Image (spheres, rainbow, N blue to C red):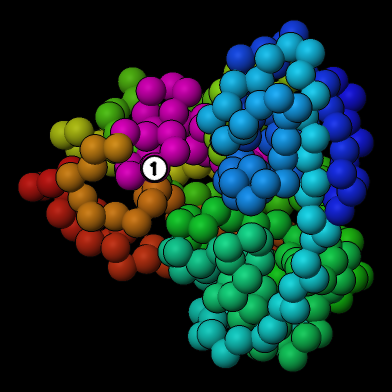
């Protein structure tokens, strides 16, 4: 199957043997890897996808040799607006700021999240004086953490700071230490998980490991406290892959507490997503050359969980 992504044009793709029996929405999400299955489900229902001689719906299973015609509408230019959203600023100067991101806040705009993001907030705070290397949707963003992960995040105000900090991230010289509560108790007090991470071939929302085609990923962990059914850990990252801590801990049988993707759906605590906090962030300042380190205090919900260890954890 050869596909060239040309948004806004109608294209036809022949189903090859390897995709025989795949759902139509899944087949299309493979052709267009930057677009979700949910997007194609809407597209199919609106009549933008057709197969000669067949009535299609998202769950339709494609057959080898069928010709799937699809028209992806042109992308709509979304205007990202500054929003007066309070920020917990840990540090700020003319080149960058370090913020303590709250739980539930998306870092940069994406389909379904064009308002209320960290970008909307820093655009207002910095009066649009942000680096533009990552484009209009992600101004100032040089790295990110997941929506329900809290903690330290650096934002760059100019391209010079952005390029310098991005170089440190690329060479893995940035200090990143996290705190998390996991299910169960690791046998050893310290350990290292070195396992290649790639997109889960069976679920595009998830990452998986170990996968031979994955990216090199290393997570060090240290047990801070052991409880009856859970453990309080510190994680130090050598690399920064998507969902790295979450997928690595799940791979050794100790997923993060309340992780909706990699953990169990059953949780006795009323939590909004994984119990993970980016506590420490350290890097060489892009202009002064001085090493700086910042610590974001644990969020209230995390402190409450630790305080309840005798009866709950």
Q: Residue at x 61, y 81 (%)?
A: 121
Q: Secondary structure at mark 1?
A: loop
Q: Position of residue 269 (x, y in %)?
A: 21, 50
Q: Residues within 10 Å of mark 1 (few under 14, many from 20)?
A: many
Q: Check the picture and name the quadrant holding the N terminus.
A: top right
Residue 279 seen anywhere in this rendered image of the structure: no
Q: Is residue 293 left or right of residue 147?
A: right
* x and y percentages locating residue 311 in the rendered image: 8, 47
| Residue 62 makes an appearance in the image | yes
List the single residue furthest toward the top: 17
Magenta-tinted stretch = 238-264
Q: Residue at x 71, y 25 (%)?
A: 53
Residue under the point 62% across and 31% down: 55
Along the horizontal axis of the image, is 61 left or right of 307?
right
- In the rendered view of the protein, which quadrant contains the C terminus? top left
Residue 96 percent across, percent down from the top left: 75, 76
**Farthest front residue in view:** 53
Q: Is residue 210 magenta?
A: no
Which residue lies under the disc numbered 1? 259
* Residue 100 place in picture, x, y as percent: 52, 70
* Quadrant of residue 130 within the rendered picture: bottom right
Instruction: Determine whether, in the image, residue 251 is placed left or right of residue 39.
Output: left
Q: Nearer the viewer, residue 262 or 28?
A: 28
Q: Is residue 100 left or right of residue 92?
A: left
Tell me: residue 118, above or below residue 272. below
Tell me the chief SS of the magenta region.
loop
Query: Residue at 30% across / 37% down in the picture?
Result: 265
Q: Nearer the viewer, residue 64 or 280?
A: 64
């Amino acid at each position: 199957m050869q596909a060239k992504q040309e948004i806004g044009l109608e294209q036809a793709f022949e189903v090859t043997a390897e995709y025989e029996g795949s759902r139509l929405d899944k087949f299309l999400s493979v052709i267009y890897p930057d677009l979700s299955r949910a997007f194609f489900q809407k597209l199919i229902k609106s009549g933008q996808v057709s197969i000669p001689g067949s009535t299609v719906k998202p769950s339709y299973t494609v057959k080898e040799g069928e010709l799937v015609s699809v028209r992806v509408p042109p992308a709509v230019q979304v205007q990202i607006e500054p929003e007066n959203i309070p920020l917990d600023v840990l540090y700020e100067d003319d080149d960058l700021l370090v913020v303590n991101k709250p739980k539930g806040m998306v870092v940069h705009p994406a389909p379904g999240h064009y308002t209320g993001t960290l970008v909307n907030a820093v655009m207002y705070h910095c009066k649009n004086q942000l680096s533009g290397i990552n484009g209009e949707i992600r101004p100032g963003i040089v790295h990110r953490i997941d929506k329900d992960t809290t903690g330290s995040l650096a934002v760059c105000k100019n391209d010079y700071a952005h390029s310098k900090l991005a170089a440190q991230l690329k060479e893995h010289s940035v200090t990143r230490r996290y705190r998390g509560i996991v299910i169960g108790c690791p046998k050893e007090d310290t350990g290292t998980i070195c396992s290649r991470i790639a997109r889960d071939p069976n679920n595009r929302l998830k990452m998986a490991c170990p996968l031979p085609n994955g990216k090199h990923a290393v997570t060090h962990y240290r047990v801070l406290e052991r409880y009856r059914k859970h453990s309080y850990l510190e994680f130090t990252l050598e690399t920064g892959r998507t969902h790295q801590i979450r997928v690595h801990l799940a791979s050794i049988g100790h997923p993060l507490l309340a992780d909706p993707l990699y953990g169990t759906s059953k949780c006795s605590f009323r939590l909004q997503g994984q119990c993970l906090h980016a506590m420490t962030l350290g890097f060489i300042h892009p202009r002064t050359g001085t090493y700086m380190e910042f610590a974001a205090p644990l969020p209230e919900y995390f402190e409450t969980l630790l305080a309840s260890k005798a009866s709950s954890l």
